[in-house]
Image (tube, rainbow, N blue to C red):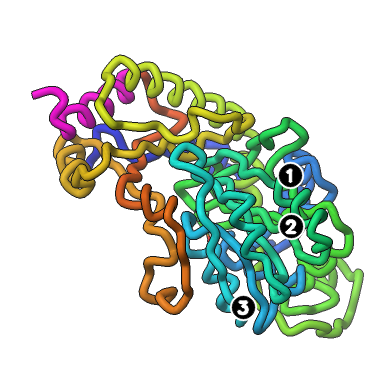
Amino acid sequence: MSWKVPLTDVTLGEEEALAAAEVVRSGWLSQGERVAAFEADFAAMVGVPHAIAVSNCTVGLEVAYSAVGVGPGDEVVMPALTFVATANAARRLGATAVFADITSDDDLCVDPADLLAKVTAKTRAVVLVHYAGFAADVAAVRAGLAAMGRGDVAVVEDCAHAPAAGSRDGSGRCGALGDVAAFSFFSNKNMTTGEGGMLTTGSAEHDRALRLLRAHGMTTTTWDRHRGHAFTYDVVRVATNARMDEIRAAIGRIQLGRLAEANRRRGVARGWYLDALASAALPGLQVAFTEGRYGDGAQHLFVVLLPPRVERAAVMASMRAAGVQTSVHYPPTHRFAAYADVPAALPRTDAVADRLLTLPLGPAMGEAHVALVVDALARALGAVP
Ligand SMILES: Cc1ncc(COP(=O)(O)O)c(C=O)c1O
């Protein structure tokens, strides 16, 4: 299908192509100096001392949970309104995902009070997702855990939507707010390496664990041995292979250089949406993240809530016929068959779940694209003939 306005767009240029080709010509494709350089650049962007590149965010979350001690029988509290990877990563370690509600129909990030209320003696970690690129309230969760005397509970950030997003209170960037964070560089994200991800942490101890768990629990890497820095290794944890390769790291460094401008352009497009939707005055339509203070978001998604009881599939079909791609982020995890055994009372998530609609947003969008989307939405809702 060729869309007039696709859900998002990726800015990849000749620089990325050349960087990838240079790696191929170098003859060293697996984790090496470009991965190390990408890690250093990414750590500097987030404002943390440690960044650990991984093959994707899903396995990165698994590595992150494992590094903070999540294992069989533990509970990990997290929102249900997220991509299923947030929960699957915990399940795959033998832990139980416990779901917390969103804050409101404007603040679609997890509610700190509900998250904290679901912490039990079995809780090993809590996860905050910076949904749509808007920072979740990590500071409130940290303060709450401290007040409960539960400093042993790790705070993990799922930053898949939020590279370079700022916290609500302006104190730092997403990825520097909790104990460990996981980013995604999948193709539809704000910066991409095709598949890929990055973990960040301020803790040297977590950094050591993350590096071990990224690479089989081995004490040295192939790259160390290639450079003659080591001849042998021990295996001190049972772990997987979650490494990134040099081709992706080379592309990722270029993408990171484009990130600030791409996020700025996304923010401009959001502004056009807010103006166009205000003019269209569509009855019952709400734009998420407009009422509170959400910090300097990464503008990953532009999410609206359709008027109650409108048939979303029909709206999406009508917009599709007009050449506009839309999506739903997300069917909440507690509604999936694989999670039917998890008791979850999430009235606020359930109240918005069938109304959520993601409109196109990307750095190459112009004002005319936004006008076309809003017009298609207005027609789909019957606001114009
Ligand atoms: C919130 C969230 N967490 C985790 C992931 C998993 O990322 P990846 O595709 O890099 O494994 C995604 C990606 O879609 C996501 O949106």
Looking at numbered disc 2 in the image, what kind of residue is underneath it? Val
Name which of mark 3 and mark 2 comes first in the sequence.
3
Quote the CA–CA distance across marks 3 and 1: 25 Å
Residue at screen point 28% across, 31% down? 284
Q: Nearer the viewer, residue 123 or 178?
A: 123
Looking at the rendering, the stretch of residues picked out in magenta corresponds to 368-385
Q: Chief secondary structure of the magenta span?
A: helix
Report which residue position mark 2 lands on: 180
Q: How far across and down, in percent of the image, does residue 270 sit?
A: 45, 26
- Res. 263 in view: yes
Q: Residue at x 22, y 41 (%)?
A: 2
> Hey, what amino acid is under mark 1?
Ala
- Is ligand 1 less than 8 Å from the beta carbon at label 3? no
Please indicate whether residue 80 sits to the left or right of residue 327 in the image. right
Percent from the top left, x then y, of residue 223?
79, 67
The residue labelled by disc 3 is: 95
Q: CA distance from mark 2 to mark 1?
A: 14 Å
Q: Is residue 362 magenta?
A: no
Label 3, label 2: how far apart the Cα atoms are = 18 Å
Q: Secondary structure at mark 2?
A: strand
Find residue 168 and report its image quarter.
top right
Is residue 374 in the magenta section? yes
Query: As rendered, which of 366 and 22 lies closer to the eye?
Result: 366
Residue linked to disc 1? 139
Q: Residues within 10 Å of mark 1 (few under 14, many from 20)?
A: some
Q: Residue at x 58, y 61 (%)?
A: 78
Q: Secondary structure at mark 1?
A: helix
Horizontal and vertical percent for residue 90? 60, 72
The mark that comes first in sequence, 2 or 1, is 1
Q: Secondary structure at mark 3?
A: loop
Can residue 1 be seen here? Answer: no
